[in-house]
Image (cartoon, rainbow, N blue to C red):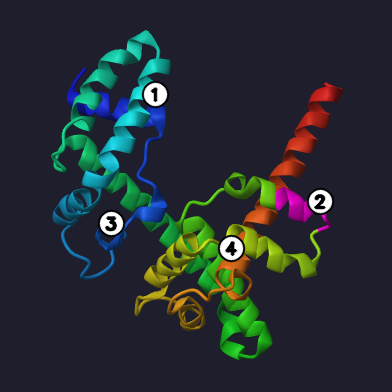
Amino acid sequence: MTPEEALARVLGLTGLSLPRGVLGPETWALARALGDEPGAGDPAELAGAASAAHWPELRGPMQAALLRARDRADADDLEAFETVLEWAADEDPDTPLARALAVRAAQELAASNARARALLRAAEATVVEGGAEAAVAASTAAGAIAADLLDLDPEDFGPEIAEYVAGGGRPEDVDELARSTGDPEIRTWARSAVASTVDDPEAPNAADGVRVLASGPPPEDPALDLVWVPTILALTQEAIERSLVDEVSDQAADEA
């Protein structure tokens, strides 16, 4: 097995990826280059910069994840894991593993960025018209974009979402849902991620409205954060949809 084959096998088995919420401007620059944006730069050079920016901080967690995966791996896969674990123990950000993880993270960002553009185009007509509906459309788009770009999962806020849904999902309870989930760090990340997506002259016109919402630091009260409130509501809706799918699947299994 070649080193390249070992790397591809381990990444395919583990789905290992850099946490999207901590990715910096270097990875965003690589994502734009991989998305073929004009003037984005040389992907190979940008991959090195992205790897150098994140590997010192994330090498340890990546190594720990690989060790856990190796302990559960089949015997046929152990050789591949040993090859990749040698790179995981290396502080050099230019190893095949470090660079591959940077490229994978950028590819995921590029895909999320494409979905963000689709959301902005869908909101275009409403945002351009202005008024209250425009603000709602821009805020809804910002929330969906943030949830995707940060790779958030409803399970990250399971107890808070469950309490909100159990209470009937009433509009008057949204403020408490936002406050119980929106710590300053994650709300700052959310704004930064949204701002990175819309800060592009090629973005749809609806980006202007979203840019205004994501500008500056988040308000002290999460319930007044027009990026975080729609983000947690988007995650709540996803949680409800997952629950309905699971319920239908269970019913089908019982009837089988």
Report the span colored magenta: 161-168
Q: Which mark is residue 8?
A: none
Q: Marks 3 and 2, Cα distance to the nearest angstrom? A: 39 Å
Q: Quadrant of residue 174?
A: bottom right
Give the vertical position of 69 relative to 137 (above or below).
above
- Choose the circle earlier in sequence order: 3 or 2: 3
Query: Mark 2 or 4, which is nearer the eye?
Result: 2
Instruction: Please state which amino acid type lies under the numbered disc 1.
Output: Arg
Q: Which residue is mark 3?
A: 27
Rendered-image quadrant of the C terminus:
top right
Counting from the top left corner in percent of width and height, residue 121 is at 52, 73
- Choose the circle earlier in sequence order: 2 or 4: 2
Going 48% across and 51% down the picture, which residue do you hit? Answer: 151
Give the vertical position of 144 relative to 242 (above or below).
below
Q: Which residue is mark 2?
A: 166
Instruction: Please state which amino acid type lies under the numbered disc 2.
Output: Ala
Decide if residue 163 is in sight here.
Answer: yes
Q: Is residue 176 left or right of residue 102?
A: right
Query: Mark 1 or 3, which is nearer the eye?
Result: 1
Is 219 contained in the magenta span?
A: no
Q: Marks 4 and 3, Cα distance to the nearest angstrom? A: 23 Å
Sort mark 2 into few (<14), some (14-19) or many (20+) by Cα contacts within 10 Å.
few
- Choose the circle earlier in sequence order: 1 or 3: 3
Query: Mark 4 or 3, which is nearer the eye?
Result: 4
Q: Which residue is mark 1?
A: 68
Q: Which residue is mark 4?
A: 231
Counting from the top left corner in percent of width and height, residue 128 is at 56, 87
Toward the viewer: 83 or 62? 62
Instruction: Please state which amino acid type lies under the numbered disc 3.
Output: Thr
Q: Secondary structure at mark 2?
A: helix
